Image (cartoon, helix red, strand yellow):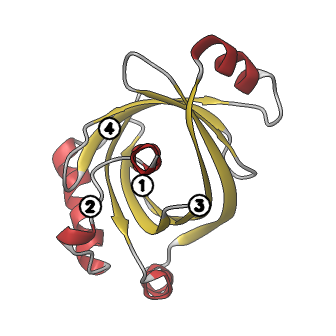
């Protein structure tokens, strides 16, 4: 189980954020075109992410609330173009599909996403991640808040729900 404190915010400051990341020696992982297929579930969320950099079946629990959020995540590395998507679609039904272009960066255990999401716009995500049980939630929260401040993310730009929720709300 992976422990994460994260934020998502609307952002039109991608150029500035890239410069800040570069100045802070962030490791650029690349830009990934990702298709996230969300499936109907009774608990948490289940999505299949299909991309060239990241391809995973992701099950997670996260509160929908303002500001930094805690989530617990389970990952299963999937093989692109496998029958997994069809199997899950048949068994659970598809809730919605999120299509995005994502730039991925890391500074130590903190992951940054600069996203352009089809039908929704532009966003920044910050994820302070603990995969080994070495950091408590207070430490992860402090890391997340540090980068929110560095990027000058306003409280009014924070998004409390997932991209899937935003798309579903649009109809």
Q: Which residue is label 4 attached to?
A: 71
Of pointers 3 and 1, the one earlier in the residue sequence: 1
Circle 1 sits on which residue? Answer: 109
The dot on residue 118 is 3
Q: Which residue is mark 2?
A: 143
The picture places residue 156, in percent across and down from the top left corner, at 20, 70
Whether residue 87 sits left or right of residue 13 in the image: it is right
Q: Disc 1 or disc 4, which is closer to the eye? A: 4
Q: Residue at x 22, y 64 (%)?
A: 145
Q: Nearer the viewer, mark 2 or mark 3?
A: 3
Which element is circle 2 on? Answer: helix
Within 10 Å of disc 4 (Cα), the crowding (few <14, some 14-19, many 20+) is some
Q: Earlier in the sequence, mark 2 or mark 4?
A: 4
Query: Would you place residue 51 above or below residue 76 in this image?
Result: below
The answer to whether marks 1 and 4 mark residues whose Cβ atoms lie closer than 8 Å is no
Q: Earlier in the sequence, mark 2 or mark 3?
A: 3
Please identify the quadrant where the N terminus is shown: top left
Q: Could you give the CA–CA distance between mark 1 and mark 4, rounded to whole angstroms?
A: 15 Å
Q: What secondary structure is found at the residue carrying circle 4? A: strand
Graded by Cα atoms within 10 Å as few (under 14), some (14 to 19) or many (20 or more), the crowding at tag 2 reads: some
In percent of the image, x 27 and y 63: which residue is there? 158
Q: Determine the image quadrant of residue 137.
A: top left
- Residue 15 image offset from top left, x and y in percent: 50, 87
Q: Which residue is depicted at the point 77% across and 32% down?
A: 79
Tag 1's secondary structure? loop
- How far apart are labels 3 and 1 at the CA level? 28 Å
Observer-side mark, 4 or 3, equals: 3
Disc 1 + disc 2, Cβ < 8 Å: yes
């Amino acid at each position: 189980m992976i422990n994460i404190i994260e934020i998502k915010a609307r952002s039109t400051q991608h150029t500035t954020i890239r410069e800040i990341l570069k100045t802070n020696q962030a490791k650029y992982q690349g830009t990934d075109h990702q298709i996230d297929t969300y499936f109907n579930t009774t608990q948490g969320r289940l999505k299949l992410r299909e991309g060239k950099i990241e391809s995973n079946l992701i099950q997670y629990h996260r509160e929908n609330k303002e500001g930094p959020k805690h989530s617990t995540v389970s990952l299963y590395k999937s093989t692109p173009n496998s029958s997994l998507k069809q199997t899950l679609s048949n068994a659970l039904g598809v809730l919605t599909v999120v299509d995005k272009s994502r730039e991925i960066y890391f500074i130590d255990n903190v992951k940054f996403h600069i996203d352009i999401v089809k039908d929704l716009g532009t966003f920044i995500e910050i994820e302070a991640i603990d995969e080994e049980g070495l950091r408590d939630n207070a430490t992860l929260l402090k890391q997340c808040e540090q980068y929110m401040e560095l990027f000058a993310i306003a409280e009014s730009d924070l998004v409390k729900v997932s991209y899937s929720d935003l798309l579903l709300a649009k109809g």
